[in-house]
Amino acid sequence: MSAADDAPRPLVDQSVLDRLREELEEDEGYCKVFVGNFIEYLPHRIGRLRLALTTGDLEGSVDAVLSLKTSSQMVGAERLAGLAMDLEGELRSEARHSDVAVVLPQLAAAFLRPINLCSRQTMHRLQSQCSPGARR
């Protein structure tokens, strides 16, 4: 692993938001709709993940973490996507070969707090970057 791999991911990658705006051929509309939907639905995604992990539902956990990872990547929420990727890796390696009733709650204890904190920070950053007059 190189030193660059150890550097923390950006909370939000502005270049992803810029590319999204270009692809949608809009100015501020993308923030109001696409990013707004991400922000609005984020607590639900995390709630689904929490429920699946704490109840030992491996299939539901994988589905929920993939939803969180993919949606985060689409809006440039790099740090949140990275946490989801780390959890996905654990689910695919550890949980598949262990007692899910034990491992999944342990993964919940290890990952949900950082994911919750990062999601709040990400929502605030996205809201500030997509507010009227925000730097582009």
Image (cartoon, grey):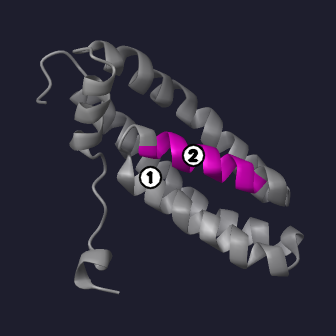
Q: Amino acid at mark 2?
A: Leu
Give the secondary structure at mark 2. helix
Front residue (pair 48, 30): 30
Residue 124 position, x and y percent, is: 33, 35
Residue ID at (26%, 72%): 7
Q: Quadrant of residue 75?
A: top left
Amino acid carrying label 1: it is Leu
Judged from the image, the secondary structure of the residue bearing numbered disc 1 is helix
Q: Residue at x 30, y 45 (%)?
A: 12
- Horizontal side of 63 relative to 81 (left or right) equals right
Q: Nearer the viewer, residue 25 or 97?
A: 25
- Residue 52, position in %: x, y? 78, 51
The quadrant of the rendering that contains the C terminus is top left
Q: Which residues are magenta?
A: 61-73
Instruction: Answer few, some or many: residues within 10 Å of disc 2's Cα (few below 14, many 20 plus, some between 14 and 19).
Output: many
Specify whether 35 is left or right of 87. Answer: left
The percent coordinates of residue 76 (x first, y second) are: 35, 43
Which residue is nearer to you in this view: 97 or 103? Answer: 97
Compared to residue 46, the image places residue 54 above or below, namely below
Which residue position is annotated with label 2?
68
Q: Is residue 89 above or below residue 61?
A: below
Q: CA distance from mark 1 to mark 2?
A: 8 Å
Q: Position of residue 122 (x, y in %)?
A: 37, 42
* Residue situated furthest bottom in the rendering: 1
Predominant SS along the magenta part: helix
The structure residue drawn at horizontal position 70% and vertical position 68%, both measured from the top left corner, is 91
Q: Which picture quadrant has residue 107?
A: bottom right
Circle 1: is it few (<14), some (14-19), or many (20+) Cα within 10 Å?
Answer: many
Residue on which disc 1 sits: 80
Is 67 within the magenta?
Answer: yes
Contact check, label 1 and label 2, Cβ < 8 Å: yes
